[in-house]
Image (cartoon, rainbow, N blue to C red):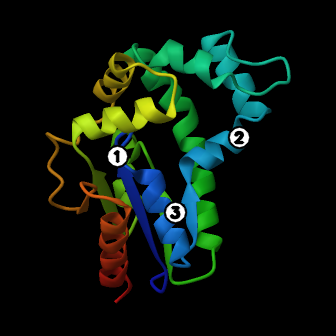
Amino acid sequence: MTQSKKIYAWTGGIGSGKTAVSGIIAEEGYPVFSCDKIYGELTAGGELVDELERAFGNVALPDGSLDRGALAAKVFCDKSALERLNGITHPIIMRELLARARSAEGKLVFCEVPLLFEGGYAQLFNGVIVVLRLLGQRIAAVTARSNLTPEEVTARIRAQFDYDRADLSAYITLHNDGNMDDLRKKVKKIIRSIAN
């Protein structure tokens, strides 16, 4: 990273509001890059899908793209399988994410990195914003946007990094505990403090 450019990551558990934060940052005119979007591009077909098919079996669709549901079913309740998946996908995604962030215009760039702490990537950024939300609100948010039951969502949350017990004192924390207007005000305040 050049000294004139600051690259910040934001992260948080499933259902914490990372996508909403992403939208607000983009509305403010800053470049935004997403691991999930890059993963989506890489899993549309090609080398990464071939590698995942070899590792897990029966996860490729007839058109060559990844069957994300089939892969999720194989890894979210199996810690060793999830670690194997992350070991394959994380380095490729992070390489692409940082390349895009470094080449982006502007002095302040933001990257959404859902598995930042699990992958040990915090030190790659100038700073980290952690989006936090109460467990019940997270479960409700995910069940509302997916076909998952509350029990399935809870299992996925338990398989992730435990934000409630982690020491987050070295990072900027953003408590998503209100409505969209509250979240927008909090995000703008954080951006102002980083940009100065």
Residue 16 is marked as 1
Judge by depth and name the residue closer to the eye, 184 or 25. Answer: 184
Image: 98 above or below 43: below
Residue placed furthest toward the top: 58
Counting residues from the start of the chain, the first of labels 1 and 3 encountered is 1
107 sits left or right of 155 in the view: right
Counting residues from the start of the chain, the first of labels 1 and 2 encountered is 1
User: What residue did someone put label 2 on?
Assistant: 42
Local secondary structure at mark 1: loop
Q: Mark 1: give few (<14), some (14-19) or many (20+) Cα within 10 Å.
A: many
Image: 15 above or below 172: above
Residue at 62 percent of width and 25 percent of height: 68
Q: Mark 2: give few (<14), some (14-19) or many (20+) Cα within 10 Å.
A: some
116 sits left or right of 39 in the view: left
User: What residue did someone put label 3 on?
Assistant: 23
Marks 1, 2: nearer the viewer = 1
76 sits left or right of 196 in the view: right
Gap in angstroms between the C-alphas marked 2 and 3: 22 Å
**Amino acid type at image mark 3:** Gly
